[in-house]
Amino acid sequence: MITNKTIYTLKKYRQLNKKETLYGTLLIWGGTILVSVLLIIMPFISSVDKIFFIIFGVMVFLMVAVVRIIKYVSFGKNINQDIEREYFFNEEGFSVTSSTKGNKSTTNYDYDKIVNIKKDQNNIYLFITKKSAFIIDNQGFTNGNKEELLALLSSKVEIKKK
């Protein structure tokens, strides 16, 4: 059995989701600003009621801003609590025990749930969906090591190319 203990932090999450977070944020804010500016300048280039478009443009911007701020604040509350994850790998599958603030839960997985595997110098990422992955710290092995885990995964996981 191969075991690993990883502390899941905001820094690890951001390493995994660096590009998606940046591009998503730029797209949402860029689109919001463009729509808001168009709604605000529309009355000055046409003969429609000016106050309606100005108020509507400002409202669109503020609604998106408030939603993004609420999402950021609530996400920050959840992820700022470090989550300790213990991974147990054997021939049949793997289990993940998550602990945060004294609460523990364990979930078992078959290897066919893994849709992709990525690695960098610090971590192994086991994707169970296109965007959701377990992060396994290369320094967190308590039984076995990175090479043994990768060998086990290569024999158990079939990555389907699209």
Image: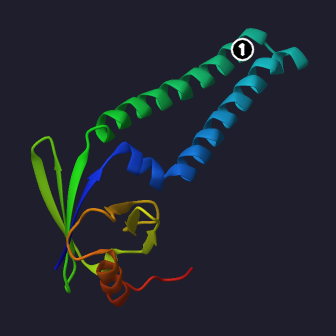
Q: Position of residue 72 (x, y in %)?
A: 43, 33
- Front-most of 149 and 60? 149
Q: Residues within 10 Å of mark 1 (few under 14, many from 20)?
A: some
Q: Which residue is mark 1?
A: 54
Q: Amino acid at mark 1?
A: Ile
Q: Quadrant of the C terminus?
A: bottom right
| Residue name at image x 86 percent, y 15 percent | 44
Considering only vertical position in the picture, is 59 above or below 74? above
Horizontal side, residue 49 vs residue 133: left or right: right
Q: Residue at x 62, y 24 (%)?
A: 61
Q: Nearer the viewer, residue 15 or 112?
A: 15
Instruction: Give residue 131's quadrant in the image.
Output: bottom left
| Lateral position of residue 117 relative to residue 46, left or right | left
Q: Nearer the viewer, residue 70 or 22?
A: 22
Can residue 46 be seen in the rendering of this structure?
A: no
Q: What kind of element bears circle 1?
A: helix
- Look at the picture and state if 144 lies above or below 76: below
**87 or 158: nearer the viewer:** 87
In the rendered view, how is the structure colored? rainbow
State whether residue 18 is above or below residue 78: below
> Which quadrant of the rendered structure holds the N terminus?
bottom left
Relative to residue 39, is residue 29 depicted above or below? Answer: below
Residue extending furthest toward the top: 51
User: Could you say where residue 3 lies in the image, as x and y percent from the top left?
Assistant: 19, 71
Q: Is residue 75 visible?
A: yes
Q: How many marks overall?
A: 1
- Where is residue 103 drawn, in percent x and y? 11, 46
Residue drawn at the location 29% of the way across and 82% of the way down: 148
Residue 91 falls left or right of residue 35: left
Residue occupying the point 33% across, 46% down: 9
Image location (x, y in percent) of residue 53: 73, 17
